[in-house]
Image: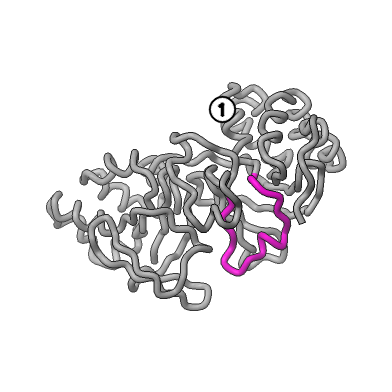
Amino acid sequence: MFSSIGGFYCLAAFASGVAAAPASDLSAALAGFPSLTSLKSLVDQRPAVFDALLSSHPSVTVLAPDNDAFAKYSSTNGQPLSQAASADLNNILSYHILGAGLTSANFSAARGITIPTLLQGELYNNRSAGAELTQTFGADANGQVVYVQARQHEDAGFSLQAGGDADAAILMALDKTWPGGYLHIVNQVLDLPRNCSNTLEGESSLKTLSESLENTDVYDAIDYASNVTCLAPSNAAFEAAGNPQENLSRSELNSIMWSYALPQPLYPDHIRDGMELTSMGNTTIKITLKGNDTYFNDAKVVQSPLL
């Protein structure tokens, strides 16, 4: 699970260069899809915003929210996306543009794929790319990431994890080319990442952890720290351990909570069996891969990642 500072794990052929008027080209590509008329209208209404974003990379992948996603956004936020303030719209759209041209073949990697977007700035992206992302996507791979993997029990599509939302979006890979790269459909307007405390407070399965952290100094530190991954025990994990937080002093709870924080971004597809990491509480964390399951010491990952 990743927040804008880094992340959390819940335990138990590329197209040619972008054309001079990418918004116009994108609008033309969207015209062939009845389910994407809301996005096409937005492109036509705000072409300058799209031109600026789409011209920043030689090849990109646009994650296109469908009409139902636009309707849900309007209902949730009390206004259509087209009426969002320019800065907010720019951030939201940036998070829907991947910094490389990618197809369903890329999304089908055995352990999924972590992909940098064009979303920048410490408010939403207080992390650095790291060697593996830079090696895969180049020196410009500094934007906040999304994580895509094949859906485990469904016949079609991919799951896409973004923002602080535990419910993954569904990505339908079109492999549709346009002069700026590729185009795929998503069934959500993606939530922007939030800091650690806001991310945890929004997840009912992590309520006990959130309440425990409120009684420590950890929240104040990692909300503003960079490049942090947190291993987040679920409510069930606390209960199975006898809810030890109820009988610990603040100092003892501080010490334990820091042992679940790692001083680096740790993406699912970059994990290797047998890796050993040192937590910010100076404890050793060994990673074990068993089939499709991941363990940190003896704790199994039951949900990853929340961004």
Q: Is 38 positioned to the left or the right of 279 in the image? A: right
Find numbered disc 1 in the image and state the secondary structure of the residue it sits on.
helix
Tag 1: amino acid? Asp
| Range of magenta residues | 98-115
Toward the bottom, the furthest residue is 290
In x, y percent, where is residue 219? 29, 43
> Residue 286 at what x, y percent from top left?
34, 71
Compared with 278, 203 (above or below) is: above
**Tag 1: Cα neighbours inside 10 Å, few (<14), some, or many (≥20)?**
few
Residue 297 coordinates in the image, percent (x, y): 33, 71
Number of marks in the image? 1
Which residue is at a point 61% across and 32% down the rendered structure image? 75
The residue depicted at 83 percent of the width and 43 percent of the height is 33
Residue 112 is one of the magenta-drawn residues: yes
Q: Residue at x 15, y 55 (%)?
A: 252
- Relative placement, left or right, of 253 versus 103 is left
Q: Residue 27: within the magenta?
A: no
Which quarter of the image is occupied by the N terminus?
bottom left
* Residue 299 visible: no
Q: Is residue 131 something that shows in the picture? A: yes
Query: Compared to 121, does 167 lie above or below?
Result: below
User: Position of 256 compared to 200: left or right?
Assistant: left
Q: In the shown orientation, is residue 300 left or right of residue 218?
A: right
Percent across and percent down for residue 202 are: 42, 44
Colour scheme employed for the rendering of this structure = one colour
User: Can you identify the residue that label 1 sits on?
Assistant: 88
Q: Residue at x 29, y 62 (%)?
A: 278
In depth, the one of 72 and 120 nearer the eye is 120
